Image (cartoon, coloured by chain):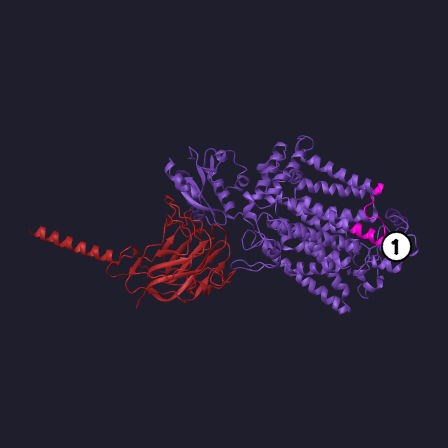
Chain colours: A red, B purple
């Protein structure tokens, strides 16, 4: 009997924990769960309308047939990156200025995009304090069908990316950028931006790498938005 | 009589009026200095054009032309196709360069071997100014040379392996020969004119537009002269007829030799004439050419100001503004004149003999007086100014009216506009009343030319394949080079090496056949074949979805760009991809263990 009661109690606790975890786990969904809220994004106007294709490849992201479903994030999540200082591996961009990365402008038109030099480049955002990330949204360029290469997104506690480095996304399949081979998929840029799971990672600095794109060898950023909660 | 002669534009002003004190180094040259400076500019232009010649990926058309030249190089055979590819001269003139490059076959050639041909044509265009130097005068010649050297469009398409720069160079040769023939009426120059026209026709069918513009300009000049001299307008003298026949005969012979593949394909010349039926349809911008249909102001807008999307602005407005001045002064007879044979004609007219002699006799008299070879004054010969002005106007209007437009087609009339810009610069220079004003004008001109050079550098290096560059048109993206490199890396792991099977399953694949010229077994399908599997497949993004269920083997897939908005999917058989990753990892580990 004690075994039965113990097992029932254990099962109840496990189910409750699982339910709790399910409730706060962020992700793409059509329904909200307790303890979460919909990530509200202000999207720019679509600048090109490509025909989404159902590509089955294991290492390419299947383009969504319509709008992206609502993304659930933990309750209390806010936009942390707006107006935050940006530095880069290319301190003198070809076009635009680095502050455009966090200025909330996403239209992709004149004056809202920064163009960085050839090859592997990164932008780094100082969020000002330690945060716990829920989601990131990245707009590289959305005037035409384009894929950015070797996209790697990392968060760290220090500006030199030595302490507490967490890789949130890496689609450098052949390690050509030297940051390790990634298993994430290549994706087409759209006006909706690329939404990345923040994985609850903690840190203060965000670094986003890319290594040219399918149209040219340059690197572009229209906007980066980091969502999460500030840590005490 | 003197009044009449002046009205006829035959009287040259006193040389001292045009040549101000202190500018003798410019006005008083007698060849050496001017030739030296043109040679110096040409050398600079050559150096500029040779920089990073392989940096820009091959455009689709460059790829097609290179493959055609490669076929001729490998097989020694060429057969004119009236539907595509234009004339054969580009391929034949590429042969010596390919042979000198040391390449044994097409597979061993390099990008630069092909692009050296338009580079030399672009520099040749500058050197051919020497044929016009005595008629243009020093300032106009040097200004035109400088603008030809640094005009962004001229530099860009001087590094572009298509027919256009060669066509413009032969047109410049024809203009030079025509002008020199007009001065001397020598049979050799008539033959040179015929050679140039024959080569123009052997280069591209649109040479008929150039020839039409030249004929209209020269015809106008002759009629104007005869009208002012009171000579019969339409009478053709026996010698003139002979010269015409000589030029036409040489042109037909040269074109016939090229189009018949040097007599190996006798039907070629006939096909070249039949091709006009096809090209007339294309110039209308209908059917498949509809995508190239543009409004009449397309080229002028492109030259005046372009700023598409976030990025720099582009303008060859300096050339346009100076050309408008040059056109105005040339058409209204206000050019700063030199002391060329017009002076002698005036003396003939003055003594009363001019009215009674035929034009031919007058020219014979000119020769006998030893003035046929003009000594070259500081100004511009009004006849040459008028000839070039009408030619440029006809070319500009013709290309504006043709609905089919691509950026490289502007080169023909841009060449004319640059010559007119030279005349415009000379008009302003000689019109300056003060020495300081002339010095300031030269400095301003140099600064403006430098600004064009900076744009040319931007257009040819950083923005060489970027659609924000106005001369980049449906251009291949740098990914095509990366794609070819990745296929090569995979072939190195395959037991068959470059005999590995590569399947292109896409209607859009040029210039990849050029980049994969070392591969022996490459298949191209515009639709999915029944047995699509191959170690490497390159598939159009639209076809991948239908292809996936038909594949036997697993594949690693990656996006590659072909042109802006045109994506291909590179499918590498999974086992090959894993081997590739392993070898790369081993190599990285080895480097880490043994740092240099």
Q: Position of residue B294 (x, y in %)?
A: 57, 51
Whether residue B46 appears in this view of the structure is no
Task: Kindly identify the residue that appears in the image at 70 percent across and 53 percent down.
Answer: B392
Q: Chain of mark 1?
A: B
Q: Which residue is mark 1?
A: B344
Task: Kindly identify the residue that appears in the image at 60 percent across and 41 percent down.
Answer: B65
Quadrant placement of the N terminus of chain B: bottom right
Q: Position of residue A107 (x, y in %)?
A: 44, 61
Task: Kindly identify the residue that appears in the image at 30 percent across and 55 percent down.
Answer: A27
B122 sits left or right of A52 in the view: right
Q: Position of residue B424 (x, y in %)?
A: 72, 60
B349 sits left or right of B455 in the view: right
Task: Kindly identify the residue that appears in the image at 69 percent across and 49 percent down.
Answer: B123
B406 sits left or right of A206 in the view: right
Magenta stretch encompasses residue B392: no
Residue B28, image quadrant: bottom right
Residue B6, image quadrant: bottom right
Of B344 and A72, the residue lying toward us: B344
Which element carries disc 1, helix, strand or loop? helix
- Magenta-tinted stretch: B221-239
Magenta stretch encompasses residue B223: yes
Q: Position of residue B327 (x, y in %)?
A: 72, 58
């Amino acid at each position: 009997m004690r075994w039965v009661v113990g097992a029932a109690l254990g099962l109840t606790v496990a189910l409750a924990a699982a339910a709790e975890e399910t409730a706060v786990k962020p992700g793409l969904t059509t329904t909200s769960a307790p303890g979460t809220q919909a990530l509200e994004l202000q999207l720019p106007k679509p600048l090109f309308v490509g025909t989404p294709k159902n590509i089955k490849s294991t290492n390419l992201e299947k383009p969504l047939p319509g709008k992206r479903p609502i993304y659930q994030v933990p309750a209390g999540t806010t936009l942390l990156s707006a107006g935050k200082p940006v530095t880069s591996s290319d301190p003198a961009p070809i076009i635009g200025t680095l502050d455009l990365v966090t200025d909330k402008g996403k239209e992709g038109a004149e004056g809202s995009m920064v163009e960085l030099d050839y090859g592997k480049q990164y932008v780094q955002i100082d969020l000002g304090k330690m945060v716990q990330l829920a989601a990131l949204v990245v707009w590289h360029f959305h005037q035409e069908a384009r894929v950015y290469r070797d996209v790697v997104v990392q968060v760290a506690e220090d500006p030199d990316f030595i302490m507490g480095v967490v890789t949130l996304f890496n689609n450098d399949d052949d390690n050509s950028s030297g940051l390790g081979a990634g298993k994430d998929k290549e994706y087409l840029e759209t006006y909706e931006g690329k939404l990345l799971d923040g994985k609850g990672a903690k840190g203060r600095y965000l670094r986003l790498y890319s290594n040219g794109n399918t149209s040219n060898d340059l690197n572009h950023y229209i906007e980066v938005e980091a969502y999460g909660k500030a840590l005490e | 009589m003197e009044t009449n002669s002046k009205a006829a534009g035959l009287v040259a002003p006193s040389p001292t009026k045009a040549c101000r004190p202190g500018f003798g180094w410019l006005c008083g040259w007698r060849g050496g200095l001017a030739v030296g400076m043109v040679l110096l500019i040409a050398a600079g232009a050559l150096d500029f054009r040779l920089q990073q010649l392989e940096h820009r990926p091959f455009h689709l058309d460059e790829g097609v032309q290179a493959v055609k030249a490669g076929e001729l190089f490998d097989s020694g055979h060429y057969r004119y196709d009236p539907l595509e590819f234009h004339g054969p001269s580009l391929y034949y003139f590429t042969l010596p360069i390919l042979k000198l490059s040391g390449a044994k076959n097409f597979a061993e050639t390099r990008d630069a071997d092909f692009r050296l041909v338009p580079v030399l044509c672009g520099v040749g265009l500058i050197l051919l100014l020497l044929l016009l130097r005595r008629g243009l005068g020093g300032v106009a010649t040097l200004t035109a040379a400088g603008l030809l050297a640094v005009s962004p469009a001229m530099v860009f398409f001087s590094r572009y392996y298509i027919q256009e720069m060669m066509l413009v160079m032969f047109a410049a040769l024809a203009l030079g020969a025509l002008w020199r023939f007009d001065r001397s009426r020598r049979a050799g120059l008539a033959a040179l004119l015929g050679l140039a026209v024959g080569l123009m026709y052997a280069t591209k069918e649109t040479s008929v537009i150039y020839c039409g513009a030249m004929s209209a300009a020269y015809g106008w000049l002759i009629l104007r002269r005869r009208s002012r001299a009171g000579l019969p307008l339409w009478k053709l003298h026996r010698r003139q007829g002979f010269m015409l026949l000589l030029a036409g005969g040489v042109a037909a012979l040269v074109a016939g030799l090229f189009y018949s593949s040097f007599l190996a394909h006798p039907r070629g010349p006939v096909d070249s004439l039949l091709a006009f039926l096809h090209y007339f349809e294309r110039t209308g911008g209908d059917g498949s050419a509809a995508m190239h249909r543009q409004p009449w102001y397309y080229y002028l807008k492109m030259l005046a100001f372009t700023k598409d999307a976030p990025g720099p602005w582009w303008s060859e407005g300096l050339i346009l503004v100076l050309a408008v001045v040059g056109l105005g002064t040339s058409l209204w007879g206000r050019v700063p004149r030199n002391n060329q044979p017009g002076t002698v004609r005036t003396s003939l007219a003055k003594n009363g003999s001019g009215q009674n002699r035929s034009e031919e006799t007058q020219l014979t008299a000119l020769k006998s007086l030893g003035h046929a070879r003009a000594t070259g004054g500081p100004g511009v010969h009004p006849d040459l100014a008028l000839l070039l002005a009408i030619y440029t106007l006809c070319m500009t209007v013709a290309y504006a009216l043709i609905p089919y437009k691509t950026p490289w087609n502007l080169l023909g009339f841009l060449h004319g506009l640059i010559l007119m810009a030279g005349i415009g610069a000379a008009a302003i220079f000689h019109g300056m009343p003060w020495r300081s004003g002339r010095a300031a004008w030269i400095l301003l001109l140099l600064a403006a030319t430098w600004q064009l050079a900076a744009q040319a550098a931007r257009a040819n290096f950083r923005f060489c394949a970027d659609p924000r560059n106005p001369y980049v048109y449906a251009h291949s993206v740098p990914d095509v080079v990366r794609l070819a490199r990745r296929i090569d890396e995979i072939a190195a792991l395959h037991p068959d090496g470059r005999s590995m099977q590569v399947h292109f399953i896409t209607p859009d694949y040029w210039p990849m056949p050029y980049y994969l010229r070392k591969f022996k077994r490459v298949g191209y399908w515009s639709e999915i074949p029944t047995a699509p599997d191959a170690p490497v497949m390159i598939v159009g993004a639209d076809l991948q979805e239908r292809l996936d269920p038909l594949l036997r083997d697993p594949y690693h897939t990656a996006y590659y760009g072909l042109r802006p908005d045109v994506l291909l999917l590179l499918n590498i058989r999974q086992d090959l991809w894993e081997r590739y990753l392993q070898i790369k990892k081993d190599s990285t580990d080895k480097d880490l263990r043994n740092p240099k």
